[in-house]
């Protein structure tokens, strides 16, 4: 490997580690909708009455 490439690689910053930012789920039934969201900060969720159709 040429010296210029080797020295450039020595100063290159490594790629940041990939991490999960958020994950969630939405579940709908005729009578309700359940939403859950998980992040590094914690867990939130809601339960709502279903819409009439």
Image (spheres, grey):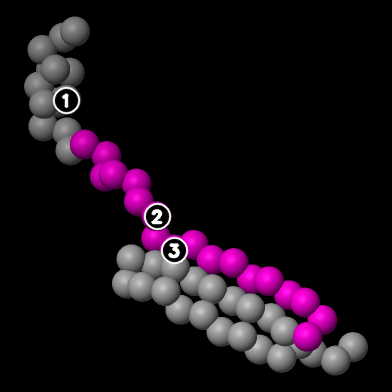
The percent coordinates of residue 3 (x first, y second) are 10, 12
Going 78% across and 85% down the picture, which residue do you hit? 31
Q: Where is 21 relative to 53, above or below?
A: above
In space, the residues marked 2 and 3 are separated at their CA atoms by 6 Å
Going 72% across and 84% down the picture, which residue do you hit? 32
Query: Which numbered marker is on residue 23?
Result: none
Q: Main secondary structure of the magenta part?
A: loop
Residue at disc 3, secondary structure: strand
Query: Which numbered marker is on residue 9?
Result: 1
Q: Quadrant of the N terminus?
A: top left
Q: Is residue 48 left or right of residue 36?
A: right
Check disc 3: other Cα within 10 Å, few if <14, some if 14-19, many if 20+: few
Q: Nearer the viewer, residue 32 or 4?
A: 32
Q: Quadrant of the C terminus?
A: bottom right
In space, the residues marked 3 and 1 are separated at their CA atoms by 33 Å
Residue at disc 2, secondary structure: loop
For discs 3 and 1, the disc positioned in front in the rendered view: 3
For discs 1 and 2, the disc positioned in front in the rendered view: 2
Mark closer to the chain start, 1 or 2 = 1
Q: Is residue 52 left or right of residue 44?
A: right
Query: Which numbered marker is on residue 22?
Result: 3
The percent coordinates of residue 40 (x first, y second) are 33, 66
Residue 42's image quarter? bottom left
Query: Which numbered marker is on residue 20?
Result: 2
Residue 33's image quarter? bottom right
The percent coordinates of residue 24 (x first, y second) are 53, 66
Residue at disc 1, secondary structure: helix
Check disc 2: other Cα within 10 Å, few if <14, some if 14-19, many if 20+: few
Q: Where is 2 relative to 22, above or below?
A: above
The percent coordinates of residue 52 (x first, y second) are 85, 91
Going 59% across and 67% down the picture, which residue do you hit? 25
**In this picture, which residue range is highlighted in magenta?**
14-31
């Amino acid at each position: 490997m040429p010296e210029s490439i080797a020295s450039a690689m020595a100063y290159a910053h490594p790629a940041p580690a990939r991490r999960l930012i958020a994950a969630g789920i939405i579940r709908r039934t005729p009578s309700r909708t359940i939403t859950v969201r998980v992040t590094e900060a914690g867990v939130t969720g809601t339960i709502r009455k279903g819409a009439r159709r």
